[in-house]
Amino acid sequence: MSLHELYQEMIVDHSRSPRNFHKLQEKAQNLEGYNPLCGDKFTIYASFKGKKISDLSFEGNGCAISTASASLMTEFMKNKSFDEAESIIAEFQRLVTGGELKGVDLGKLQVFEGVQEFPIRVKCAVLAWHTLRSLLHGERKAVTTE
Amino acid sequence: MMVRKDFPIFNIKVRGKPLVYLDSAATTQKPQVVMDTLNKYYSSQNSNVHRGVHYLSELATKEYEAAREKVQKFIHAKDSREIIFTRGTTESINLVAQTFGRERVQEGDEVLITHMEHHSNIVPWQILCSEKKAHLKIAPINQKGELLIDEFKKLVNPKTKIVGIAHVSNALGTINPIKEIVSFCHDHGVPVLVDGAQAASHLKVDVEALDCDFYTLSGHKIYGPTGIGVLYGKLKHLEKMPPYQGGGDMIKSVTFEKTIYNDVPFKFEAGTPNIAGAIGLGSALDYLSALNMEKVQKYEEELLKYMEEQLLTLPKIKLIGRAEKKAALQSFIVENIHPHDVGTILDQEGVAVRTGHHCAQPVMNFYGVPATVRASLGIYNTKEDISLLVLALKKVFEVLG
């Protein structure tokens, strides 16, 4: 397993210049994700329209893997429906842990495949995704209440 | 030191490369003699201690108590009864907090520690203070990672009931001026617990000269087995302290109406102790004594100086912990590269370092970093290890630079 498979060009690029790296204006939901073991801390911001993620951004501090993962997530998940988002999050989890994939299209998120060879770094790759999932679950409850 | 051959672990390959072990502050590797001692104990001496009348029990008891005397000599305690075997430094500090501390600290009192403590010298005192409605006071440090001794002294007052302080900081390597601190605290009637987890494998420890009230050790950080540690306490304190845990071995007689506790140190060793661990620790201390701790200290000081110099030749490296007096480790960060990424890349080169907050989050907060990379040394490290660290760091720049 070479380091370059873990630190692929796209991952290094997104870790150096994270996309959607800012707060979201008004009405955005936000949730903090924190990994107490390594100190990685991100806040994920999301706006919803109907049952869709209409906008997504993040702020915070972390290693190259967790930062790039959050950055690529904010790009990839924009305009996804809640159902699509759930299945992508689950598939991403399978990708980085070496689970059996179910054919959900992960597009360029495939660059994180190398993470499965570095078990200690899995939690870095999934931090933003777990946070988004919690955010979505919170939002759904709110939506149901209305 | 020509000791590498004594440590079988250096025969392994890590990802096809020789092992460069720079994580001795987390745990040291073990010399063959310690493993042989454990093997010998389980093969030909194994029995429970302080109980049976049979041959093996007598033998195991003799070896276990001999280990206690080895610890006594190694840290220069007056009396072997002042040596209590525990699971490690964490348990030793909890023991003191929950017995000595519980009796001594009352509502409104203060416990004083420093900003550079390991979580294990913070949390037991927080638990005590919260139970007693007492206050935990923190003595500040400077940017170099040294205790501000004048500020420390200002914090000692009639409400101060105990001081807890690291001999050597695990995150910064700072050696604290324990003798001066103990002397000052005693002038004000305050007893001092010294966390020696990071000191005893690097410095010659003399508890009598330090005059501290309590001193703690972890066996696995001093070339011994895991799961064994030491609490040294002055006899005058230990005799007055209530037991920590109840059970077998810590009693003289038990009826349902009344139990008479055993004498020290047995009063604090409830249940069957880690007999093999204690005997293994004894052999590790024999091994270190034969090397001579003054020589160990001198060798590691030179190596640390070399490591600092070499790290400073690299661009983008910021050293954290620049105290005048330091022992055997250097924390650092690489500009714009997270310590975990540094750690992963070094690991691919066979170089083992610790990355993270080192169980010292207040230290990380002080420097405004989430984590650092820590390279820590032991007697088996060489200048070549440092050169390989430097080469591996160059690889970090190549991959992520």
Image (cartoon, coloured by chain):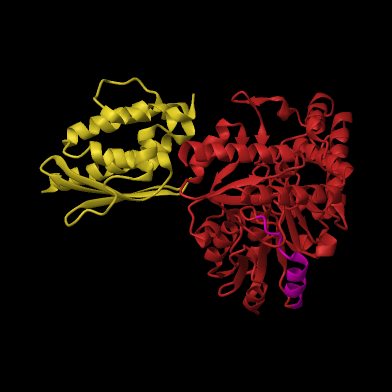
Chain colours: A yellow, B red
On the image, the x and y values in percent for residue B238 come to 77, 60
Residue drawn 19% across the image and 56% down it: A25
Q: Is residue A4 left or right of residue A31?
A: right
The kind of secondary structure the magenta stretch mainly shows is: helix
Q: Is residue B234 shown above or below B255? A: below
Q: Is residue B388 left or right of residue B76?
A: left
Closer to the camera in the image, A61 or B230: A61
Closer to the camera in the image, B374 or B396: B396
- How many marks the image carries: the answer is 0
Q: Is residue A73 left or right of residue B43?
A: left
Q: Quadrant of the N terminus of chain B?
A: top right
Q: Is residue B179 shown above or below A22? A: below
Closer to the camera in the image, B239 or B284: B284
On the image, the x and y values in percent for residue B17 come to 63, 26
On the image, the x and y values in percent for residue B204 come to 82, 54
In magenta segment, residue A13: no
Closer to the camera in the image, B366 or B36: B366
Q: Is residue B375 left or right of residue B262?
A: left
Q: Is residue A40 shown above or below B166? A: above
Residue drawn 48% across the image and 30% down it: A3
On the image, the x and y values in percent for residue B387 come to 67, 39
Residue range of the region highlighted in magenta in the rendering: B173-187
In the figure, residue B77 lies in which quadrant?
bottom right
Any part of residue B3 in sight: yes
Residue drawn 55% across the image and 44% down it: B355
In the figure, residue B38 lies in which quadrant?
top right
Any part of residue B272 in sight: no
